[in-house]
Amino acid sequence: MERTIRLTAAQAMVKWLSVQNTEDGERFIEGIWAIFGHGNVAGVGEALHKYREVFPTWRGQNEQTMAHAAIAYAKTKKRTRAHAVTSSIGPGSTNLVTAAALAHVNRLPLLMICGDVFANRRPDPVLQQIEDFDDGTVSANDCFKPVTRYFDRITRPEHLLTCLPRALAVMTDPANCGPVCLAFCQDVQAEAFEYPESFFEPRVWRIRRPEPDPREVEDVIAAIKASKRPMIVSGGGVLYSGAEAALTDFAARHNIPFVETQAGKGGLSYEDALNFGSPGVTGSACANALAAEADLVVGIGTRFQDFTTGSWTVFGASDRKLVSINLHRYDATKHFAAPCVGDAKVVLEKVSQGLGDTRFGWHDPAARTHWIDTVKTVTAAPSSDGLPSDAQVIGAVQRTSTKDTVAMCAAGTMPGALQVLWLAAQGGYHMEYGYSCMGYEVAGAMGIALADPSKEVICFVGDGSYMMANSELATAVMRKVPFTIVLTDNRGYGCINRLQIECGGAEFNNMYVDSNVETQPEIDFVAHAASMGAHAVKACDIADLEAKIAEARGRDIPSVIVIDTEAVSGTGAGGHWWDVAVPQVGGPERLEKARERYQHNYSKQRIFD
């Protein structure tokens, strides 16, 4: 008879997680972020204390931002490592829902262990319990079902024997990777059970490289050979596959130009002669010109999101065909693409072998050179007084950056501006733009720095996003995690204000000056950041910003550099149309003109071919 060990369910979970390893001998779930409440402090909290020497616990300030740090960590580790987050049963759990959605959209691993109601229902309803009048099995944690890859409710201690391996299988699956929610009933956390000793034997989780169907590989080879003007769209899947070198070799061997999505940017250096920047709404002029002429678009590890495709207007050639190389058939078959389901590195090597000495030469190298010159012009330091633009702030950071600098952001003006203007070194770009979640920036910067301390992390954040979620700055100070925040203060939501104008709307409720407030706020961001222990200063101009970025290097705590910016200018270069619907009736002349522009571009969309 197999020997057993008597543990509470929470103790068994933590003990099991502590011995789940990667192929390099590291723990896959490195540790857990925790804010305790009545729904997890007595069960999970006690277990985490018991195993604190082998499974670390980190205290954060908000469940959502703790999860953001965990997600940024996993993204930086290219999904080979992950973190867990635990919460109590009510607001703590629902605080995590946004982060779960972010991880789901970006296909990133995150383990959420959320307290739940009593399985025995004896004290029903308990504090913070959500009651469904028609379904007695529902709790707040059911909110996670649409935004997780795997959801389970642990109502008996022995459920761990099946749910924990399933959770790790999802998070280490290259095709189905995403967030997991384990709703852990708070009474069950404390219940004891005789667990088999074999359950706690160390296990290695391998991340597979799925081989493609040979017929689909042949289809890709045939499509490329039949084309005259092929181009490659490199997405985040290239990074997670570790296919950067394979893509470099493939593009060079066959002389095929490539562009990078937000998730794929920084996979290869901007200096690569075949790298034409990014396509689409916030794309470079040379990339969008390439996309307009290409007769074959080969997507690798991309979802073909609307920003990448210019809402399906950027790939404009009448004879254009679409190929999609992706780990998941759901993504590979979007928009009637010819699919090739498999690992990016494996597929590239097989397709390259099949192409032999096939080479192309249709792209114009001068267009790429001209674009880089344009970027340097629009990001140059201002020659006159006045508030700098976001493009000029990017230029200041660019000029002070090194090969170890990682530019990161998530929402507002800067993601689009960085995609079109930042000249990324290989591995020098981290953008959360699948969900474009305001508030990811500060916590995400901490997650990147934790994952790779050798990098200089520079977080671009606007005053709007900073106001939404900044509390993990205190956590970074406590843990002495250094990174630099460049906080651009344009006194409102400048990005959406510009979009509002573009769509024919009046300036309303975005900038403080256009909001229904009696007093315009004058927020002292330097004092605020300093109050949490960060090194905080204000830059008086672009030259001062450059100097202060250099000064931040070498500190062992976060540095916050605030600079006032103007909110009117866009990037000044590049870009493409984005489908944001304009009201069909009503409004003044500006709205009528916006409708005309919208209808003109709408007619160019190619959705079903």
Image (cartoon, rainbow, N blue to C red):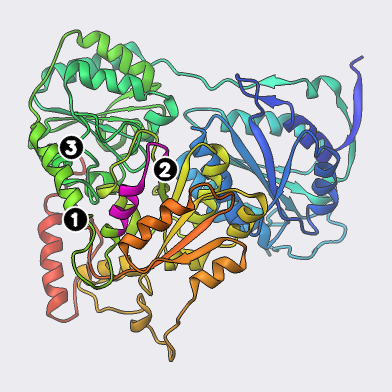
Q: In which quarter of the image is the N terminus?
A: top right
The picture quadrant where one finds residue 190 is: top right
Q: Gap in Å between the C-alphas at discs 1 and 2? A: 21 Å
Q: Quadrant of the C terminus?
A: top left
Between marks 3 and 2 in the image, the one whose residue lies nearer the viewer = 2
**What are the residue bounds of the magenta stretch?**
393-404
How many numbered marks does the figure carry?
A: 3
The picture quadrant where one finds residue 168 is: top right
Mark earlier in primary sequence (3, 2): 2
Q: Mark 1 = which residue?
A: 378
Q: In this view, does 592 lie to the left or right of 46?
A: left
| CA neighbours of label 3 inside 10 A, class few (<14), some (14 to 19), many (20+) | few
Q: Is residue 211 left or right of residue 392?
A: right
Q: Gap in Å between the C-alphas at discs 1 and 3? A: 37 Å
Q: Mark 2 = which residue?
A: 406
Q: Is label 1 in contact with label 2 (beta carbons under 8 Å)?
A: no
Q: Mark 3 = which residue?
A: 609
User: What residue sits 24% from the left and 17% below the top?
Assistant: 219
| Residue in front for this viewpoint, 511 or 14 | 511
Mark earlier in primary sequence (1, 3): 1
Element assignment for label 3: loop
Residue 298 lies, with reference to residue 578, above or below; the image says: above
User: What residue sits 72% from the left and 30% below the top?
Assistant: 162
Q: Gap in Å between the C-alphas at discs 3 and 2? A: 38 Å
